[in-house]
Amino acid sequence: MSEPVQVDVDALQDVLTAPDAAFQHDYLEIRGLKVVFDGFTAVDGVDLTVTRGDLRFLIGPNGAGKTTMVDAVTGLAKGSGSVRFGSTELLGKNPTRIARAGIGRTFQTASVFGELTVLQNLDIAAGSSRGMRTLLRRRKSPPSEVEAALETIGLTRVAQVPAGALAHGQKQWLEIGMLLVQNAHVLLLDEPVAGMSQAEREETGLLLRRIGQQRTVVVVEHDMEFMRTYADSVTVMHQGRVLAEGPVDQVTADARVIEVYLGNRSHGRGSVQTSARRDS
Ligand code: ADP
Ligand code: MG
């Protein structure tokens, strides 16, 4: 990445505008979630509860079903069981309605509009929660939450640059910014730091930690070291099921977790950080 970019966690306060009370009782509750593709069970009866203020990491080897679970929660994969956000059942709703209910996600490959500028991407995301009429009304300057989001994600200086020209890490930040201006209550981030430099990872970690204090955040991650540094709690998935869950120290010391990561490594399928092998 050519130019040094920094996120501004202080500016985040201005994006997270919703009154605290509205988020006080937020939680995502998944029960018996199952996703089957042509007879193959990718998610096999997952129970998962994530509360606001608990930065949850979801880890597990390649193919464990992490992305599929996020897909099911956001309506992109058909699942059975139950996924509730507060009193709202999400399963069976289409992706647009799930997004409107306050559930936002990012993708392993950033899904920004490459030909539109950074600012336009944020503006559209903000508009999607404001309604079409407001979106179509011409504005002289970006709304304040968009400006605050730009600062938060460190992209103010590149606001007029087409999103497609951004570095990989910046695209991920833009996606996070889009969720913030959409006022997502639940953020599901699929491997946000993959491909980022060490400096960008640290910036992102701080940002996630800060967002996690106010919102319900699930970070799907492969990097054990990153997880150890920033997670409040962690859920480990393996072969479509929850293998272990709890505080980071407890879970990373779990013999079954170590074995899964070691086993995965010996099969050469996924990236495994050495920190997972401290007991071996
Ligand atoms: P993870 O994100 O943990 O690496 P995925 O959720 O992407 O794992 O995949 C879980 C399993 O489901 C894998 O075996 C994968 O090949 C399979 N899978 C994912 N999506 C599909 C699909 N659309 N059709 C068939 N199989 C799929
Ligand atoms: Mg995945």
Image (cartoon, grey):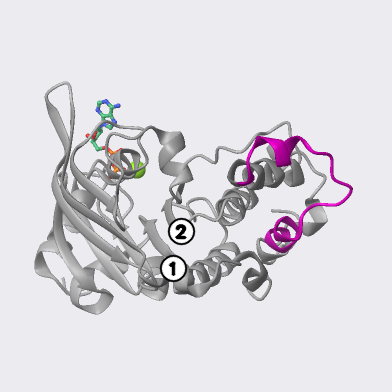
Q: Name the residue at 75% across, 54% down.
A: 2
Q: Quadrant of residue 25?
A: bottom left
Give the amino acid type for the residue marked by disc 2 in the picture: His
Can residue 106 be seen here? The reply is no
In the image, is residue 44 above or below residue 249?
above
Q: Is residue 141 magenta?
A: yes
The reply to whether dot 2 and dot 1 touch (C-beta < 8 Å) is yes
Seen in the image, is 220 located left or right of residue 180? Answer: left
Q: Quadrant of residue 52?
A: bottom left
Can residue 205 be seen here? The reply is yes
Q: Which residue is mark 2?
A: 185
Q: Secondary structure at mark 1?
A: helix
Seen in the image, is 144 located left or right of residue 55? Answer: right
Q: Residue furthest top?
A: 38
Give the amino acid type for the residue marked by disc 1 in the picture: Phe
Magenta region, residue range: 130-150
Q: Secondary structure at mark 2?
A: loop
Seen in the image, is 61 located left or right of residue 171? Answer: left
**Residue 23 image label:** 1
**Residue 145 image label:** none
Q: Quadrant of ligand 2?
A: top left
Q: Name the residue at 68% across, 47% down.
A: 122
